[in-house]
Image: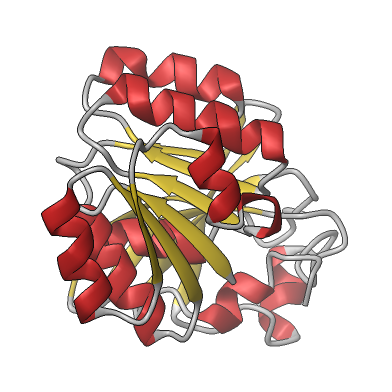
């Protein structure tokens, strides 16, 4: 995955650390010269110093080839501009921090896939949102357990399966419980005979945490 990160503060730096450790290709745009220099020294990634909302810098960073664009600056206006540029470039996965929750609808109307409060999520959780775009929301419960909302794609292994079939065929392991199904903005409490459909948003309790294997069951690109 090729990830461009705009803003290298505490959150952005942590995303860079995790992404490079996972061998992802990373480019960073940072306005602060000292911060940009430190990042370039500490990590194996492309670091560009300059205006965070510059189309020229985004092109230099390889915007048209990027799989994900993440904006983590403290300024919502800058982040919104970055997301607008990302959409213009056709970057597949857009994620941004938003400091003022009243600004969130502007990001959502633009088509940003995830809008997160930097006060709610740590850099580690932010990275997970980048790395796992199917996961729309999540909550750590302790002892490794998580509750997550996952978008189910048409054609995914779980699509058109009942919960009974998913359990019987091993598509869902015993440590995973489907808590709710959101279909066309209607929330359903699932039963064994409930059929999962492409386009559903599934709330899952994973007692051992969400694994890549579980995420793959919700994706048509496996």
Query: Is any atom of residue 122 visible in this view?
Result: no
Q: Looking at the rendering, which quadrant does residue 140 occupy? A: bottom left
Residue at left offset 26%, top offset 38%: 73
| Rendered location of residue 194, percent (x, y) | 72, 53
Query: Is any atom of residue 92 visible in this view?
Result: yes
Task: Name above or below for residue 148 compared with residue 90.
Answer: below
Residue at left offset 69%, top offset 80%: 171
| Rendered location of residue 124, percent (x, y) | 26, 65
Task: Name above or below for residue 60 compared with residue 175.
Answer: above
| Rendered location of residue 89, percent (x, y) | 69, 39
Colouring: secondary structure
Name the residue nearer the viewer: 199 or 14. Answer: 14
Task: Name above or below for residue 11 compared with residue 169.
Answer: above
Horizontally, residue 149 falls left or right of residue 111, namely left
Which quadrant is home to the C terminus? bottom right
Name the residue nearer the viewer: 179 or 32. Answer: 32
Name the residue nearer the viewer: 28 or 118. Answer: 28
Across the whole image, how many numbered discs are drawn on residues?
Answer: 0
Name the residue nearer the viewer: 210 or 29. Answer: 29
Residue at left offset 43%, top offset 85%: 22
Residue at left offset 22%, top offset 27%: 99
Horizontally, residue 162 falls left or right of residue 39, namely right
Which quadrant is home to the N terminus? bottom right
Q: Looking at the rendering, which quadrant does residue 78 occupy? A: top left
| Rendered location of residue 12, percent (x, y) | 26, 56
Task: Name above or below for residue 32 compared with residue 12.
Answer: above
């Amino acid at each position: 995955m090729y990830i461009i990160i705009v803003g290298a503060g505490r959150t952005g730096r942590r995303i860079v650390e995790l992404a490079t450790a996972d061998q992802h290709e990373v480019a960073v745009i940072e306005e602060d010269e000292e911060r940009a220099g430190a990042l370039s020294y500490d990590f194996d990634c492309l670091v560009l110093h300059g205006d965070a909302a510059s189309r020229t810098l985004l092109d230099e960073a390889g915007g048209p080839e990027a799989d994900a664009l993440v904006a983590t600056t403290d300024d919502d206006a800058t982040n919104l501009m970055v997301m607008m540029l990302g959409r213009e470039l056709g970057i597949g996965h857009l994620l941004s921090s938003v400091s003022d929750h009243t600004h969130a609808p502007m990001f959502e109307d633009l088509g940003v896939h995830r809008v997160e409060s930097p006060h709610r999520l740590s850099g580690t959780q932010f990275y997970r949102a980048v790395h796992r775009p199917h996961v729309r929301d999540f909550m750590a419960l302790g002892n490794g357990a998580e509750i997550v909302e996952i978008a189910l794609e048409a054609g995914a292994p779980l699509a058109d399966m009942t919960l009974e079939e998913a359990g019987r065929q091993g598509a869902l392991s015993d440590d995973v419980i489907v808590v709710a199904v959101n279909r066309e903005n209607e929330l359903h409490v699932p039963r064994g005979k409930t059929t999962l459909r492409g386009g559903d948003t599934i709330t899952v309790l994973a007692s051992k945490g969400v694994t890549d294997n579980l995420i793959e069951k919700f994706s048509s690109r496996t």
